[in-house]
Image: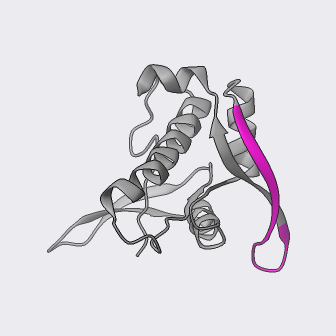
Amino acid sequence: DAYFISSGCPIEDSNLSPDQHAMRAVEVALALQRIVPAVCDDGSVHMRCGIHTGNVIAGVVGKKGPRFHLFGPNVEYANRMESTGVPGKVQISFPTKQWLDIGGHDYIFEDRAVDMGGRHDKTFLVTRSKARAAKKIR
C-alpha cells in the first residue's frame, strides 16, 4: 500500500520557506521509519519513503465524494521516488536536497542513481538527521 503526503499544500504558508517544508517532510519520513517496528510485529514489513520538491496543480475532484488531488509531473516524480526507494529508507530527489542545503539543514546522505523512465537521476538516501531546526518541531 502507498500513502501520499504533501507539505505546503494547498495554501502556501508564508511563515515557512520551501527549505522548511522539505525539512519537515524529511523529518516526517524519518519518524515514520522509526515508528514502524513499534506498531508492527511483523519484521518483514518495511516502509519505503520517497520525497520530491516541486510545483503541483491542486484541486477538488468529484461530486458525490469530493477529494483533494494533486496533479502534474512533480506528483509522478514523487511517486517514482517512493517506488524506486529502498525498504526501510528515505529517498529524496536532487531538488529536495538542494532546498535542504539552501536552508542549512544538516543531514547525512548516501548518493544513488535511479532509473527514472529511461534516464538515470541522482537521488539520495537520508541516513541520519542532524538538523537543528528539526529538533525545535519535534
Direction from residue 64 to residue 67 in the image, left or right? right
Direction from residue 86 to residue 110 in the image, left or right? right
Quadrant into which the C terminus falls: top left
> Which residue is more in the foreground, 34 or 20?
34
Q: Residue at x 74, y 31 (%)?
A: 101
Q: Is residue 49 magenta?
A: no
Q: Residue at x 24, y 72 (%)?
A: 62
User: In terms of image quadrants, where is residue 66?
Assistant: bottom left
Q: Residue 50, image x and y in percent?
A: 59, 59
> Which residue is more in the foreground, 88 or 16?
88
> Which residue is more in the foreground, 20 or 36?
36
Q: Residue 110, image x and y in percent?
A: 78, 50
Q: Residue at x 67, y 46 (%)?
A: 127
Q: Residue 42, image x and y in percent?
A: 38, 72
Q: Is residue 35 above or below residue 2?
A: above
Q: Residue at x 69, y 29 (%)?
A: 106
Q: Is residue 118 above or below residue 132?
A: below
The residues colored magenta run 107-120
Tell me how the rendering is colored: one colour
Direction from residue 112 to residue 1 in the image, left or right? left
Direction from residue 95 to residue 76 in the image, left or right? left
